Amino acid sequence: MASLAEIRAKLKSQEVNRSTSNTGGDNAIYPHWNISEGSEAVVRFLPDKDETNTFFWTERNMIKLPFAGIKGQTDSRPVTVQVPCMEMYGKTCPVLTEVRPWFKDKSMEDMGRKYWKKKSYIFQGFVTTNPLAEDSTPENPIRRFIIGPQIFNIIRGALMDPEMEEMPTDYLKGVDFRITKTTKGGYADYSTSKWSRRERPLDEAERAAIDTHGLHNLGDFRPKEPTEAEVKIIAELFAKSVEGEAYDLEQYGQYFRPAGVAYQGKPQVAVPTASAPAATPVAEAAPTAAPVTATAPAPQPEAAPATAVPAGDSAKRAEDILKLIRSRQAK
């Protein structure tokens, strides 16, 4: 387990870098976004099983690709396909490579934000005070939490505070975290969430749960890294989304598809030119082949690149972008 000093050092290094540049279908994920306004859920975060992870969370970057509907379905409503951003794996993302220049044109800002990566953070731990009337709770009380940037910044800020002397995940001297929900401007607001002031050792039941069930390897709940062939599929889907086409389930269903949409077609033989073989669909968590589910709230977008002076008509610019995307894919 990394020390508090190691976490602070790595967080600080990430600040420098920024300035210079499976649900499994169960209820293991605690839906804190469903608590009522004015209520509070108290949770206790636990370390990652993966001792090579400095932090007690793992970051997830996803890109949402909106489509007008599903091809061949006359009554189809607009759908969204979520795909992993390759920057999450330290690789070049074909979507962000195309999107970044859009922010140099003020008329393309909104479109750029729509396709910008959305960040969320996966934690694990106990729910010690639960204001939700859940129909059932999982046998394993070690829940997972999908935390958005607003709450994450509170967690992160406190870790950088020199007055925090112990790791908040320490079994004996750790502290709970209080998730408080209010509203601001008609939207959920968690800005009053905070760490508890008092240390609390894990009780016997919590220690027994860790001994019985073990900790999760948080990296298992990120999407698996796409193959070379799947990266080309992501680029194709992005281009078709920008063009306003309907989603082709028959062509892309075995790779990425909207949440809740089943695919029963035969595996495609023709795959975009790549050395890697065809693969199963990417899931939110590693073991299953289902697409990312919509049980968690939509992750909030990372701050988009700075904007510049407008540079021409928006429609003409969008057409030029599509031509550029197609020309790159043809190479």
Image (cartoon, rainbow, N blue to C red):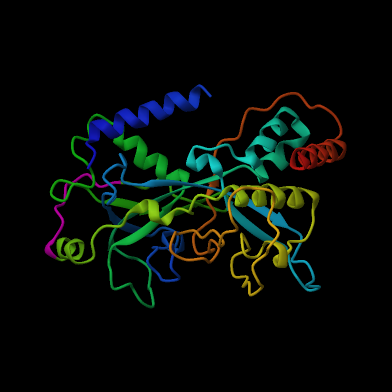
Q: What residue is shown at x 81% (from left), y 27% (from top)?
A: 311
Residue at (57% x, 59% y) in the render: 279
Closest to the observer, 314 or 153: 314
Q: Nearer the viewer, residue 175 or 269?
A: 269
Residue 193: x percent and y percent? 37, 48
Would residue 54 be counted in the magenta stretch? no
Q: Main secondary structure of the magenta part?
A: loop
Query: Of all residues shown, which one is farthest toward the bottom?
Result: 135
Q: Nearer the viewer, residue 72 or 12?
A: 72
Q: Residue at x 38, y 26 (%)?
A: 13
Give the camera-side residue of 162 and 328. Answer: 328
When asked about the image quadrant of residue 278, the answer is bottom right
The quarter of the rendered structure image containing the C terminus is top right
**Residue at point 71%, 59% (across, down):** 270
**In the image, 45: left or right of 15?**
left
What is the residue that sits farthest to the top in this orientation?
20
What percent of the width, then of the height, locates residue 316? 87, 37
Count the labels in the image: 0
Name the quadrant containing residue 15: top left
Q: Position of residue 210 (x, y in %)?
A: 20, 61
> Is 196 inside the magenta-drawn segment?
yes
State whether residue 159 is above or below residue 235.
above
Residue range of the region highlighted in magenta in the rendering = 195-204
Q: Quadrant of the N terminus?
A: top left
Horizontal side of residue 262 vs 214, given as left or right: right
Give residue 215's position: percent from left, percent from top.
26, 57
- Considering only vertical position in the picture, is 57 above or below 266? above
